[in-house]
Amino acid sequence: MKKLIMYICINLYTINNIHAMSKKLYNTFQRTKENIHLLNDRKYLKDYKILFIPGYFIGIIPKIMKSLRLPKIYIESFKDQKKYFQSLNIETEILKTHPLQTTQYNREIIAKYLQSSTKKIIAITHSKGSLELLDTLILYKKLHKKIKGWIAIQSPFKGTPLMDLAQDNSLSKGILGIIAKYFGGNKKTGASLTIPKRTAYLKKYQKQIKNIFKNIPTITLGTFLKPTYIPSPIDIYKKRISILNPIIILLEQHKNGDKNDGLVPLYSTYISPNTHMYLPNMDHAATNTDIPLFRSYGKKQRIILTRILIHTLLDTLSQIKLKSNKSRRKNEQNTKTRRTNVP
């Protein structure tokens, strides 16, 4: 019965509207989606550790609510996915980074964790967490072998116009700095997410980044939510409207704007077209947790999407391994032929 319910869930609208910039990746995702109810997570993931690295936005909400003495709501990125995988005795952890600290600060936390891991890691990162893992892998090349695969979700690799707007305004820039400092963060964190800063970063480390994406199988996932200009009572009742709707409209109309999830434009979420996919109808929180007033994706759907992404990644790993074995056998055959032909 449980498998039947999961099978029905994967046929819901959003997952069926996946778009991939690579036909090969699209086909792999579709094949995995159709067979996800048959795949044994415990069997395929027992040799790996799943490491979730959260981002900037979700992490600051509980801190702000506590400071304002608002009703306590337990919000943690990837908590449903963690609970699911742990129920299958699959080693899983949500890394405790500091959401308001700089990428350089958090990369040391990530590096220390990767160095201590005895298992190969499947890393699943969200938003700013993806930038922090990328920075870690650029600085610590020896840690590449620790990462078996990487799924980067809603990641502002190329920055976000929202931070450009915030940093261009002295009032909003000052408020962000005060919030960051108050919660033990760094006031420069917001500025590091602007488009000029991220563009300069990608240009500076272009070769290293290309090498990382070449050596570590990766999936980058972007999402967007269509703006609602005149919400109907039904939209509000069925939670189709996100509190980020005004920002979605703002970012679409920005000179560097695009379809977006309320914080990150779609074009910013990928580096390599061969690894990129995107989904509609999801705001910036939908992929990893439920937050009141945000677009709710649902616990079951979120877990299933994560499972599909992981098994798509594993399928990609199998294809790479098969290709490598074929290449090795061909080289061995050529070597044997040359030796035979030696007079």
Image (tube, rainbow, N blue to C red):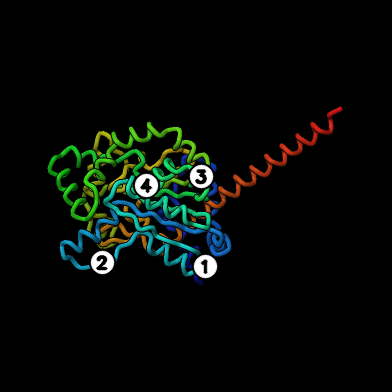
Q: Is residue 300 left or right of residue 100?
A: right
Report the residue marked by disc 3. 216
Report the residue marked by disc 2. 73
Residue extending furthest toward the right: 343
Report the residue marked by disc 4. 132
Residue count near mark 2 (Cα–Cα under 10 Å), binned few <14, some 14–19, many ≥20:
few
Q: Amino acid at mark 2?
A: Ile
Asked whether residue 11 is in view, the answer is no
- In this rendering, which labeled residue sits more in front, label 2 or label 3? 3
Contact flag, marks 1 and 4 (Cβ < 8 Å): no
Q: Amino acid at mark 4?
A: Glu
Query: Who's the residue at 37% across and 47% down the image?
Result: 132
The image quadrant that residue 251 belongs to is: top left
Report the residue marked by disc 1. 3
Q: Amino acid at mark 1?
A: Lys
Q: For the residues marked 2 and 1, what is the alpha-carbon distance in whole angstroms?
A: 31 Å
* Image quadrant where one finds the C terminus: top right
- In this rendering, which labeled residue sits more in front, label 2 or label 4? 4
